[in-house]
Image (cartoon, rainbow, N blue to C red):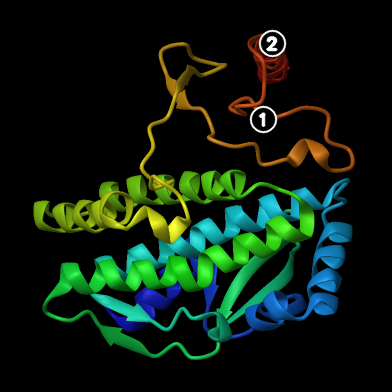
């Protein structure tokens, strides 16, 4: 695959940019976010105001969702035999306005986008790269969100896991050959099965999960994955309910939500 195609896919599918995004309204390097409390608070408050958050945990949950895509972008690159510097100092958080949806989104910009080829002893090297990334970049970021907002580490890891699994399924579907599919599966297996759980300061790998399935509100013959953690959208101004696939919703609440969805679909 050509380099331009890879850069395009990183932007389109994984919120990873090589230069400042259009309609940029705020940016901060991850090093500053981690180590300068005043700048971190400014970022959290600025983003919270833009998304009309009622609780700072919302910003943390939203960030984890976007950063889950970033993590999936690493899997995408590895699947194509390349890697880029994903250390904290090389990454900027950028907030930008999406005028199409009248929303403020998060993306991540790399200061140095130099690509390197995956070595011949691929599996061992990939495992080490992934362990270093989650130990040195992901976990410190999640820990600072935990300290700053009170959201649990488990909640954040589950939100990242949801995105990783979703994007993995997309990559499997896009595979054009059995060899490509097997490569995607092998690299994902390295992530969810082979990484030492101590990287996550846990006794198990938080990404090695199975999903509970629930009926689609519109078609009982279609099954949907229940989320592993709530996105906290309901804690924003104007939100009236939780998502249909929210794990925090009771069966009674889900039934009410189903009726609301069906009513809207026939209007």
Image point 72% across, 19% down: which residue?
264
Q: Is residue 209 left or right of residue 246?
A: left
Count up the numbered dots. 2
For the question of whether residue 241 can be seen, the reply is: yes
**Circle 2 sits on which residue?**
259
Disc 1 target residue = 243
Ranked by sequence position, the earlier of labels 1 and 2 is 1
Where's residue 175, x and y in %?
22, 54
> Which residue corresponds to the image point at 87% horizontal and 51% vertical from the top-left?
52
Whole-angstrom CA distance, mark 1 to mark 2, is 13 Å
Image quadrant holding the C terminus, namely top right
Left or right placement of residue 206 versus residue 236 in this view: left
Numbered disc in front, either 1 or 2? 1
Question: x and y percent of residue 123 in the render?
Answer: 17, 67
- Asked which secondary structure carries label 1, the reply is loop
Q: Residue at x 57, y 16 (%)?
A: 217
């Amino acid at each position: 695959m050509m380099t331009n195609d890879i850069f395009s896919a990183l932007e389109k599918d994984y919120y990873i940019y090589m230069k400042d995004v259009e309609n940029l309204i705020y940016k901060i390097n991850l090093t500053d976010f981690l180590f300068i409390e005043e700048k971190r608070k400014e970022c959290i408050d600025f983003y919270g105001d833009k998304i009309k958050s009622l609780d700072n945990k919302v910003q943390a949950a939203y960030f984890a969702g976007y950063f889950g895509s970033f993590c999936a972008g690493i899997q995408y690159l590895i699947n194509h035999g390349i890697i880029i510097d994903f250390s904290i100092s090389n990454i900027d958080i950028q907030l930008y306005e999406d005028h199409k949806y009248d929303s403020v989104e998060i993306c991540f910009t790399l200061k140095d986008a130099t690509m390197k080829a995956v070595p011949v002893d691929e599996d061992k090297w990939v495992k080490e790269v992934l362990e270093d990334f989650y130990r040195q970049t992901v976990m410190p970021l999640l820990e600072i969100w935990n300290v700053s907002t009170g959201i649990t580490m488990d909640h954040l890891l589950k939100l990242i896991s949801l995105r990783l699994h979703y994007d993995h399924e997309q990559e499997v579907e896009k595979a054009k050959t059995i060899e490509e599919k097997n490569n995607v599966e092998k690299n994902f297996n390295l992530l969810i099965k082979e990484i030492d759980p101590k990287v996550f300061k846990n006794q198990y790998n938080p990404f090695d999960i199975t999903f509970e399935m629930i009926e689609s509100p519109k078609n009982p013959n279609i099954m949907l994955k229940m989320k592993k953690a709530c996105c906290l959208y309901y804690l924003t101004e104007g939100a009236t309910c939780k998502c249909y696939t929210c794990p925090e919703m009771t069966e009674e609440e889900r039934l009410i939500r189903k009726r609301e969805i069906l009513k809207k679909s026939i209007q």
